[in-house]
Image: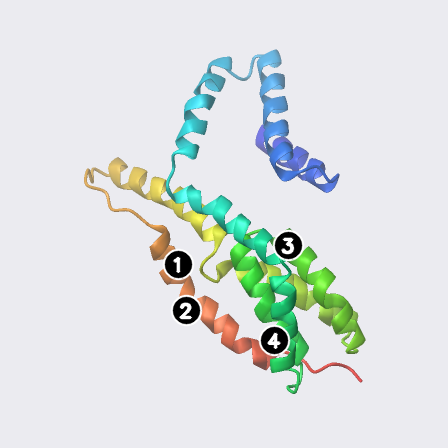
């Protein structure tokens, strides 16, 4: 029950517009304070926080996370993404649904680099939505293309989501092998996840032209 309440509290705080980092950390600390006050949470658990933070900081796999975010911010602030969208629009301009295809490709690159669905959707919305509406795309089709691209682009390597998932799965897989008596456990690396995501990512990428719709005239 407490888990469900904590999840709902995080959901409400995020809906109110607070930053993700403050929302996750703030709700967790408030829940811990309430648990200490009611006697359902041991304060000793908080003493492990410095070591856990140090472990995250020294994790070589997670070093890729801020670098991916830096790459996405660089693409946005230097207007490289805008120039890429303009170039792709010229390349696919003669095809039915060419603008939508351009938005899909650029949005996929943005989503894979930033790793943040909201940032990709907002950036692509500001850049491409006016152009798609001017090309007489239906509003549901234009907005749906942008939102789906920001979400599905997460599986295209390199992906920050796969980096985070790789760190969690590696630890869980090692613990599972140790629990069954395998004392020389194998690891699940981020490279393995990237290799596993290539085929579904490319399938989605190459099927995009067939699901793109021409603009409404």
Query: Tag on residue 118?
Result: none
Marks 3 and 1, the one that precedes in the sequence: 3
Where does label 1 land, which residue?
194
C-alpha separation, residue under disc 4 versus residue under disc 2: 23 Å
Which quadrant: the N terminus? top right
Marks 1 and 2, the one that precedes in the sequence: 1
C-alpha separation, residue under disc 3 versus residue under disc 1: 27 Å
Given residues 212 and 70, the one toward you in this image is: 70
Where does label 4 land, which residue?
88
Q: Is label 1 in a helix, a strand or a loop?
A: helix
Q: Callout 1: few (<14), some (14-19), or many (20+) C-alpha neighbours within 10 Å?
A: some
Where does label 3 land, which residue?
77
C-alpha separation, residue under disc 3 versus residue under disc 2: 31 Å
Residue shown at 71%/67% (left/top)? 128
Marks 1 and 4, the one that precedes in the sequence: 4
> Which is in the foreground here, disc 3 or disc 1?
3
Where does label 2 land, which residue?
199
Q: Is residue 162 left or right of residue 188?
A: right
Percent x, y of residue 152:
56, 62
* Residue 103 in sight in this render: no
Marks 4 and 2, the one that precedes in the sequence: 4
C-alpha separation, residue under disc 1 versus residue under disc 2: 10 Å
Please tell me whether residue 163 is drawn above or below residue 80 in the rendered image. above
> Which is in the foreground here, disc 4 or disc 2?
4
> Which is in the foreground here, disc 1 or disc 2?
1
Q: Is label 4 in a helix, a strand or a loop?
A: helix
* Residue 183 in sight in this render: yes
Q: Is label 2 in a helix, a strand or a loop?
A: helix
Q: Residue furthest front?
A: 78
Percent x, y of residue 39:
57, 12
């Amino acid at each position: 029950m407490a888990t469900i309440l904590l999840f709902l509290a995080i959901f409400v705080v995020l809906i109110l517009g607070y930053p993700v980092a403050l929302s996750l950390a703030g709700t967790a600390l408030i829940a811990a304070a309430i648990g200490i006050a009611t006697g359902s949470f041991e304060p000793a658990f908080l003493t492990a926080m410095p070591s856990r933070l140090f472990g995250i900081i020294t994790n070589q796999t997670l070093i890729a996370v801020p670098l991916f975010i830096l790459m996405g911010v660089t693409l946005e602030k230097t207007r490289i993404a805008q120039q890429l969208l303009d170039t792709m629009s010229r390349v696919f301009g003669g095809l039915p649904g060419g603008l939508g295809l351009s938005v899909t490709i650029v949005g996929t690159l943005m989503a894979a680099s930033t790793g943040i669905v909201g940032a990709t959707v907002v950036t692509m919305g500001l850049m491409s939505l006016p152009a798609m509406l001017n090309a007489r795309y239906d509003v549901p089709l234009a907005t749906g293309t942008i939102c789906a691209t920001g979400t599905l682009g997460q599986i295209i390597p390199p992906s920050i989501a796969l980096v985070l998932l790789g760190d969690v799965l590696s630890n869980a897989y090692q613990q599972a092998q140790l629990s069954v008596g395998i004392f020389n456990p194998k690891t699940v690396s981020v490279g393995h996840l990237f290799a596993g995501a290539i085929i579904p990512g490319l399938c989605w990428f190459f099927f995009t032209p067939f699901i793109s719709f021409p603009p409404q005239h």
